[in-house]
Structures are given as C-alpha cells and as structure tokens.
C-alpha cells in the first residue's frame, strides 16, 4: 500500500489519538492500547502507523518490525512519515491486543543548545495514528475508544538518553484517549527511505576501572548507536551507563564535549535473574561506555550496537598506506553514525542536526560509499519545506528553529550552506541519473540563488558579520588561521559568498537547460557570467594574486574556473606559496577543503597534492588517524599535538565534513569519476592521480549499472591500471600531466600514446609511464 501514489493510497480511517496519561515532555512515557477481536486473520492484513513523537508497536506482545526511531524525523509542520507492516503473522483469530509505545523523540524532547535550547519544538502532546487493513476493509483504527497507560520508561529524549524501570514492566491501560480532529492527515507520507536499523554489534575491545572503580568499556570504534547489556542483581538497583568519544591524555573518560546532552541510560532492575536492556527512544555518539554498578549487580554481557540508515555499502577503496585506509574506514563510520534518519553534523552533543553545509560537501562521497539516493531525496524535501518565504535555505533541516524565530533567530540564509539545495540534487543526478529530483527541487534552487543575489542586490555578496542578520555567512567554517601571534590569511565572507553565488547560479542555469527551462537557463547563465566578471574584478589583482591570498580562495577559484587564463600561471605561483607558508599543511575549512587537492592536481601539481594529503602533522587528515581517531573529527586540532583536548564547547569527534576527501580518493586517485552528461556511471571518466606512496590502489563502486572497479600499481615509473566496466557502461581514459606511452589492452594509444582512449564495457588493462 505504501508505494501507491498519494491519490491511490486509501484515505485514513484512523484518527490521531492522544493518551490521557501523557504527562508532558521529560515525564514518564505513555502508551495507547486497543483490544480487538477477529473472526479470522486475512493473509494481507497490513498495519500502517505513525505518531507525533516516536513509537514502537507491539501486537499480542510481539514487536512489529525491527525499525528504529519510527516514524522518523521530517519537517513535522508539513510532513510526517508513516510506516506500513504486514501483520498477518502477529494476529490471531479471537482476541488481539495492540500497544503503541510513545517517546518524546525529535518532536518534543530537547533540541538545540545553551540559550536556544528548547523542548516541545513541534508540539507538546504526543499522539498515535494506526490502522490495520486488508482488501476486505479496515480491521482496526485508532479512535476515542482506545485506552492509555504509562510505560516503564521514566524519562527519554534524543539528547537525554533513557531512564527505564523494569519493575514497571507490567503495562496497565487504565485511562482513555482523545481524538485530535485538528491533526492534518494530509501531512502523512510514506516513509521515503530505508529505516534506521541496528548494525552488527561490537564487543568491548578493552576494559578498565576508573579511579572511582567504575567499569569503562572501550568498544574500539566511535559510533552512533547505543549499548545493550545483560545484568543480574537485586530488585530496585539502578545501573547507570555514561558515554564518551574519548579518554583524555591522562586516560580519563571525558564527555565534556557533549555539552547539555546528558546521553545516559539509567536501568532499574526487576531482580529476578539475568535481565537485558537496550534503549527504545534515543541514541548516543560514543566509543566508550562507563558503567556504575550498584552493590550486588553483575554485568553479564555488554555490547555497543551501531544504528544507521546507511545499511547498503556501495563503495570500497584500499591503498598500500595503512593510515589512508583507516581514514577511509573513519569516513565510513562517520557516515554510518551521522546517517540516522537525517544527515547530521554529529551524533553525540546537543546538536545532531541536518546541517546543509556539511551535507553539500559530503554528498558525493556519501553516494560512493553507501546507497543513499532515497535518503537524500527525503532530506531535500525537508530542506524545501524549511525554505523561507524570501528563498533563504535553513542552516539545517528538519529545522527546529522554524516557527521559533523569537528564541532562535536567523538560522537560515548562509552561502556555502544553503547551496545544498543546488549541489545535493546535482550529486543525485550525477550518481543516480535522477532527473525527477532536479525537477522537484528546481523551483527551490532558483529561489535560493535569487535570495543570495538579493543579499547585496548584485553580483558581489557582502554578508553581514552579525549572526542572525539577513545573509550572514559561515564563510569557510573552521578554516585554520595559523598561530594567533602570527595568523595566516583566511578567505573573506564576501569572496566565499560570491564564489558560491557563482557556483550555484551557473549550476542552476545548467540544470534549467537540462530540464528545458530555456528562459531560466538564459537568465541564470547571464547572471553567472556577471558574477564571474565581478569576482575577477573585485577579488583578483592584476598580478594574479587573489585578494585574500589564502588556500580556500585559490582552491575554489581554480576548481570553478574563476581565474582568467592569462593570470593562471601567476595564481598558480601564489597558490603554491600559500601551501609553503603553511609548511605544506592544510589551510582550508569546511568549504575549502574538498576543493584543495583537486585544485592542486588541476594546476598540474599532483606531487604537491600528495604531499599535503600524506603529511601527518596538524592540520591534516592523517594526523587524526595517527592520534587514534576511528571517525572523522570536526576540527583539525580536536586533540592537540601535546595531547591536550581542544575546547569542548564545540569539539565533536564524529563529523563527516572533512571525510569529503574520499570523493577525491575515488575520483582523483582511483580516477573513477561519474560523467554528469551521461550520469549514473553509464559513462565514466578515468583519470587516475598516481601517488606512488599509495600503491597498490583498488577502488570498487556498485553503481546503478553494476560494479565498476579501477585500480593501479606502480613499479618504478611503470603504472598498470586495471579497469572493469559493467555491461552497458563505457569510459574514457584521459592520461594526466606526466603520464605517457599509454597502452590499452596491448594497443598503443593514439596521439603518440597520450590518448584519450574510449573504452567499452568489460575489463581493460592500461599501462603508462610516469615522466618529468
Ligand atoms: C556544526 C557544523 C556546522 C557549523 C556551521 C556547527 O555547530 O556542527 O556542522 O556546519 O556549526 O556553523
């Protein structure tokens, strides 16, 4: 039923009901119940169900499905997902009982931090709506006759964690329910992507007792998920589990970076032999769990259970460099831990939000590593729902500040972040050939680029410095500024904003042409040309130096062809000088970093790109791996060279943004680039960047057309590049600078072995020599 088009989907008979036992946010959790009788059980009996808050459903005591955190998280004002489950196997002839447990969830538990922390974001009362149908008709539907009661869940929240009293496990539905006729049934939509599910559990890799004698379990991997344990002990004893991503330099359990997220589990035993528990309505971001066991309580077993919406892996990349392999592994885990219903910035602190900037830089990598098409489509629909009337895109979606602008002002409209509305659909077109999402998001894209133009009513964007002011921009967030006593230049907000106005305007023009919107295509192409010319006039000196003279400026301007050809040689020199000034290290933040290495390769500096990528000092990708990271850090210097921890006020150890370098490992190093003119890897551009220190490199990607493989080995100056293309796929091999004598499947390439070479599907062996 769920895959039926809206008009074909049967109208809801059920009504949203609210339990009279609902004590409000942060109180003991309610449930609703109905007892109903069936003469017989139809084979096609199907439950469709949703809730305001989170739900977990049981029929005759058996849990329905294995999905987590249902109905999920969307911009609840406009969109509320429902799930559909076949329930024939759970029903029986005669009396049946259905229970729907309700948790505070994203709907009303704490959202945001510090002064802007809020509860009841989308409503202060929980509700459930459910019906069981078969072709013969409706067998059951939520209405005023349902009963309600209280759960053994004493308190729960996404950031808070969960308090569970097993002594209260026997459920009594002693109160009623009321029907909320004001609830908009039209907001109900089938859940648009795969469910959040448990992944393979992790056993403790190590265990130690801290100074207070508490057990600290190290699961060896930073995850988004929860612990599951079995304890044995006296009735009424309460086990407390705390979580942390790190132990500090002194080996002390440290979760100060969680800020106001309590992120704890409190389990009170019923005390009749071993009893197992895992939370229902929360998750944590952690590697370590610290357990306080009262006297007489024994930990029988404990494991860490990662949860994620990213369940089908589609990308593999290995090299001969252990730190680089771990970096790829860390990116995978950061995607798993931040793909929990929504693409979030982090899974541990009082944030965990669908930040648009992080999403736009990471989307291409995400599409390589995991099947994430519908995941992004769902999120883009929330981004569109949260778009402001003047076209501004929210900083994060679903947006808990929408409708709460009195307390959380101006969380929208930043260049580099809002551009996700153009760049993420483009990644879905390039990776999956999804024309429909381009069509669906095009109006929102156009409104966005018109909004950015309107910030300063012209091609040069002058963002105000003040957070919350219209057009405020994050610039190149977390761009390293060098030592405070002798800072290095960083990009100005006006330059980064103007560059992104160009990027999105040019892209939206291209998409308009692709969709046949000729007038828009012409208008926006013209505007993009204006922005480019204005950028060159405003930010490029006649000497070829970019005015802010920082790595991000050169990287973005080079990747997006904003530098006039005659000034490129000079700009190239200045760019290299910015790297030398940083002693060969990174000088870019969230938006500059994905462009840094591709820009160096583009100006014919693959060795310099390799050197910046492979250096192991801070700031650098491999520094954090060397320091034992198992996910990608938010900050380059989350843990300093002296082992001290950076200010916990904003220091997450699980942010995927800097993992966007994996796009370059696939497209640059392995040379496996999708072609936007023949998307979904129907045609592949092959231009490997050979970095001998990484040999052998092997990449594989399960595209819509099948598995593509590309890998190379180097022996002296001889490279052997092997490519396998699935049926119906073609490719073009384009040797890069310093690659010569190309031989493909034993045939010397044209143009004196400098190619390009067109390849049909199948396996190909390409050899060439590294020169110069
Ligand atoms: C978030 C980032 C976000 C940034 C923008 C941070 O708090 O964690 O993901 O991109 O704010 O300012």
Image: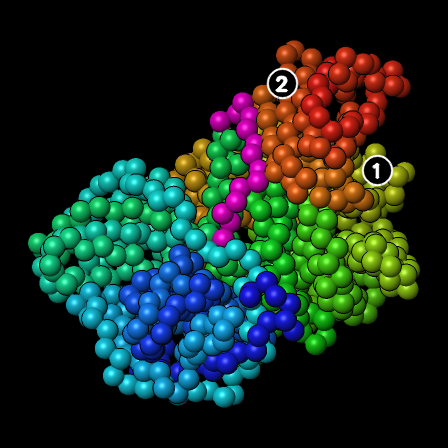
Residue linked to disc 2? 713
Relative depth, front residue between 107 and 761: 761
Pick out the residue farthest to the front. 39
Q: Is residue 314 magenta?
A: yes
Write the residue at 88% across / 43% down: 564
Instruction: Tell me the quadrant of the picture where the N terminus can be found.
Output: bottom right
Q: Residues within 10 Å of mark 2 (few under 14, many from 20)?
A: many
Q: Is ligand 1 less than 8 Å from the beta carbon at label 1?
A: no
Res 683 seen here = yes
Relative depth, front residue between 464 and 696: 696
Quadrant in the rendering for residue 375 = bottom right
Q: Residues within 10 Å of mark 1 (few under 14, many from 20)?
A: some
- Image position, residue 122 (x, y; %): 49, 77
Write the residue at 35% across / 63% down: 90
- Secondary-structure class at tag 1: helix
Q: Is residue 613 toward the left or the right of residue 721 in the image? A: left
Q: Is residue 180 magenta?
A: no
Task: In the rendered view, tell whether residue 80 sits above or below residue 673.
Answer: below
Task: In the rendered view, tell whether residue 670 sits above or below residue 504.
Answer: above
- Image position, residue 699 (x, y; %): 60, 30
Instruction: Tell me the quadrant of the picture where the C terminus can be found.
Output: top right
The circle on residue 341 is: none
Q: Are marks 1 and 2 in contact (CB under 8 Å)?
A: no
- Image position, residue 431 (x, y; %): 68, 45
Residue linked to disc 1? 568
Q: How is the image coloured?
A: rainbow
Write the residue at 51% across / 49% down: 310
Q: Is residue 390 toward the left or the right of residue 755 in the image? A: left
Image: magenta residue range: 309-322
Q: What is the C-alpha distance between the residues marked 1 and 2? A: 32 Å
- Image position, residue 289 (x, y; %): 29, 49
- Secondary-structure class at tag 2: strand
């Amino acid at each position: 039923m769920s895959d039926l088009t809206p008009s074909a989907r049967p109208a809801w008979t059920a009504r949203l009901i609210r339990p009279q036992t609902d004590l409000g946010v942060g109180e003991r959790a309610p449930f609703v119940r109905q007892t109903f009788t069936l003469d017989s059980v139809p084979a096609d009996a199907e439950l469709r169900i949703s809730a305001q808050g989170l739900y977990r459903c049981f029929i005759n005591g058996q849990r329905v499905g294995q999905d987590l955190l249902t109905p999920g998280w969307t911009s609840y004002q406009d969109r509320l997902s429902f799930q559909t489950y076949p329930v024939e196997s759970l029903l029986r002839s005669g009396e049946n009982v259905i229970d729907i447990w309700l948790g505070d969830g994203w709907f009303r538990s704490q959202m945001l931090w510090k002064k802007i922390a809020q509860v009841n974001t989308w409503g202060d009362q929980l509700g459930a709506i459910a019906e069981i149908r078969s072709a013969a008709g409706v067998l059951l539907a939520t209405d005023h006759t349902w009963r309600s009661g209280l759960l053994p869940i004493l308190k729960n929240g996404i950031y808070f964690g969960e308090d569970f009293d097993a002594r209260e496990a026997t459920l009594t539905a002693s109160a009623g329910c009321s029907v909320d006729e004001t609830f908009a049934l039209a907001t109900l939509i089938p859940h648009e992507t795969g469910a959040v599910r448990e992944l393979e559990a992790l056993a403790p890799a190590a265990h130690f007792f801290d100074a207070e004698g508490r057990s600290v379990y190290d699961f060896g991997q930073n995850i988004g998920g929860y612990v599951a344990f079995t304890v044995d002990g006296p009735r009424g004893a309460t086990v407390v589990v705390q979580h942390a991503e790190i132990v500090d330099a002194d080996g002390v359990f440290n979760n100060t970076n969680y800020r106001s997220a309590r992120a704890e589990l409190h389990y009170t035993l019923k005390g009749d032999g071993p009893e197992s528990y895992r939370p229902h309505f929360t998750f944590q971001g952690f590697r370590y769990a610290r357990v306080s066991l009262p006297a007489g309580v024994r930990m029988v077993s404990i494991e860490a259970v990662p949860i994620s919406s990213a369940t089908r892996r589609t990308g593999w990349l290995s090299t001969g460099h252990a730190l680089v392999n771990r970096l790829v592994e860390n990116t995978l885990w950061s995607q798993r831990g931040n793909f929990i219903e929504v693409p979030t910035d982090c899974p541990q602190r009082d944030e965990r939000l669908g930040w648009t900037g992080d999403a736009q830089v990471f989307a291409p990598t995400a599409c390589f590593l995991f099947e994430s098409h519908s995941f992004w489509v769902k999120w883009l629909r929330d981004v569109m729902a949260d778009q402001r009337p003047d076209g501004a895109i929210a900083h994060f979606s679903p947006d808990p500040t929408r409708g709460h602008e009195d307390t959380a002002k101006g969380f929208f409209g930043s260049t580099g972040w809002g551009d996700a509305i153009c760049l993420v659909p483009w990644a879905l077109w390039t990776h999956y050939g999804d024309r429909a999402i381009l069509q669906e998001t095009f109006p929102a894209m156009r409104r966005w680029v018109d909004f950015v133009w309107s910030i300063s009513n012209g091609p040069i964007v002058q963002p105000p410095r003040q957070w919350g002011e219209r057009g405020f921009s994050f610039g190149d967030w977390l761009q390293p500024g060098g030592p405070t006593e002798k800072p290095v230049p960083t990009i100005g907000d006006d330059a980064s904003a103007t560059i992104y106005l160009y990027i999105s305007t040019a892209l939206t023009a291209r998409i308009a042409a692709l969709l046949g919107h000729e007038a828009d295509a012409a208008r926006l192409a013209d505007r993009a040309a204006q922005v480019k010319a204005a950028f060159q006039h405003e930010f490029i000196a006649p000497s070829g130096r970019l005015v802010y003279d920082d790595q991000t400026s050169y990287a973005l301007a080079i990747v997006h062809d904003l530098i006039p050809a005659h000034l490129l040689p000079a700009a190239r020199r200045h760019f290299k000088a910015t790297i030398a000034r940083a002693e060969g290290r990174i000088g870019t933040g969230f938006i500059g970093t994905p462009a840094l290495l591709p820009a160096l390769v583009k100006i014919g500096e693959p060795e310099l790109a390799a050197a910046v990528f492979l250096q192991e000092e801070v700031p650098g990708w491999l520094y954090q791996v060397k320091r034992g990271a198992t996910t990608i850090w938010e900050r380059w210097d989350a843990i300093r060279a002296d082992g001290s921890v950076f200010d916990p006020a904003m220091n997450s150890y699980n942010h995927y943004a800097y993992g966007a370098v994996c796009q370059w490992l696939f497209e640059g190093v392995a040379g496996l680039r999708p072609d936007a003119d023949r998307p979904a890897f129907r045609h592949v551009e092959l231009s490997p960047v050979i970095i001998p220190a990484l040999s052998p490199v092997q990449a594989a990607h399960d595209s819509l057309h099948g598995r593509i493989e590309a890998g190379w080995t180097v022996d002296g100056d001889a490279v052997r590049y092997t490519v396998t293309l699935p049926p119906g796929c073609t490719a073009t091999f384009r040797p890069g600078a310093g690659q010569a004598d190309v031989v493909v499947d034993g045939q010397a390439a044209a143009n004196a072995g400098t190619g390009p070479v067109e390849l049909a599907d199948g396996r190909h062996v390409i050899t060439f020599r590294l020169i110069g």
